Each structure stands twice: as structure tokens, then as C-alpha cells.
Amino acid sequence: MERTKNRQQKLNIKKGDTVKVIAGVSKGQQGKVLDVLSDDRKVLVEQVNLVSKHTKPNAENTQGGIVKKEAYVHISNVMLVDPSSGEPTRVGRRIEDGKLARYAKKSGEVIK
């Protein structure tokens, strides 16, 4: 018997959040989330997990050559940074003013 619904768990990290890498080659680095792939459960973090990309000359890059750019990191390898303390924290959800809001588990502060 096949499943009728295949729901994925909600992601605690959104575009624009500040995260810290807790595992992998870029461990310890911190940056802003540029993009989130919810289906693949990956995030693109600014200046983290840089890879060398070989490019042909084009209108943007007339010379071509090797360009450093960010690669996606699995969401399990990053943690949200608490806005008040600046330390990595887990994320919870609670209802405030009739809306579901994310909050930092360490400080209890609502994350905007």
C-alpha cells in the first residue's frame, strides 16, 4: 500500500538568517543564508563552502578562468545563530499574537 501524503518536516532556517556551520570542511564559519532548497534540504551560505568553478569567457566574465563560488551545505550541518548572544541555538515554535513564531531555545527570544 502506497502513502497518500509524503509530508516533509518544516525547516527551521529561512533565507536571510545568520547560521554557523557545525560540521564539515567549513566547520566554525558563519554567514547569511542566501538560498534554501527545501526539497533537497540544503542551504546556500554567504562565503561558506567555496568551490573552484572553471568558466568559459562570457559577457560577464570576459577573461574566463577559475572562479570561487559558494556551494550548498546540508541543513543538518548548520545551526541558527541566536540574535542576542551570537551563539548557535536550536529553534522552537510557539504562538504569539495569534501567529506561529520561531524562537531561540537558548534565550527564549523571538527570531524575526
Image (cartoon, rainbow, N blue to C red):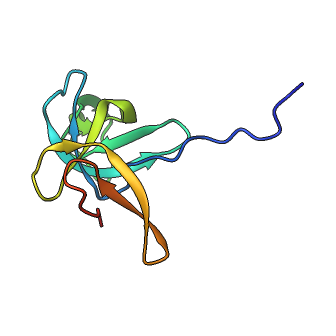
Q: Quadrant of the image for the C terminus?
A: bottom left
Decide: is 14 above or below 78: below
Question: What residue sits 40% from the left and 48% below the top?
Answer: 12
Circle count: 0
- In front: 9, or 59? 9
Left or right: 104 as drawn, with respect to 41: left
- In front: 2, or 51? 2
Q: Quadrant of the image for the N terminus?
A: top right
Residue 101 position in % (x across, y down): 40, 64
- Residue 89 found in image quarter: top left
Question: What residue sits 43% from the left and 78% below the top?
Answer: 97
- In front: 14, or 9? 9
- Residue 72 found in image quarter: top left
Left or right: 17 as drawn, with respect to 2: left
Residue 29 position in % (x across, y down): 14, 36
Left or right: 111 as drawn, with respect to 97: left
Specify the farthest residue to the left.
85
Residue 43 position in % (x across, y down): 37, 42
Specify the farthest residue to the bottom.
97
Specify the farthest residue to the top.
25
Decide: is 60 above or below 7: below
Residue 68 position in % (x across, y down): 21, 35
Question: What residue sits 37% from the left and 31% below the top?
Answer: 76
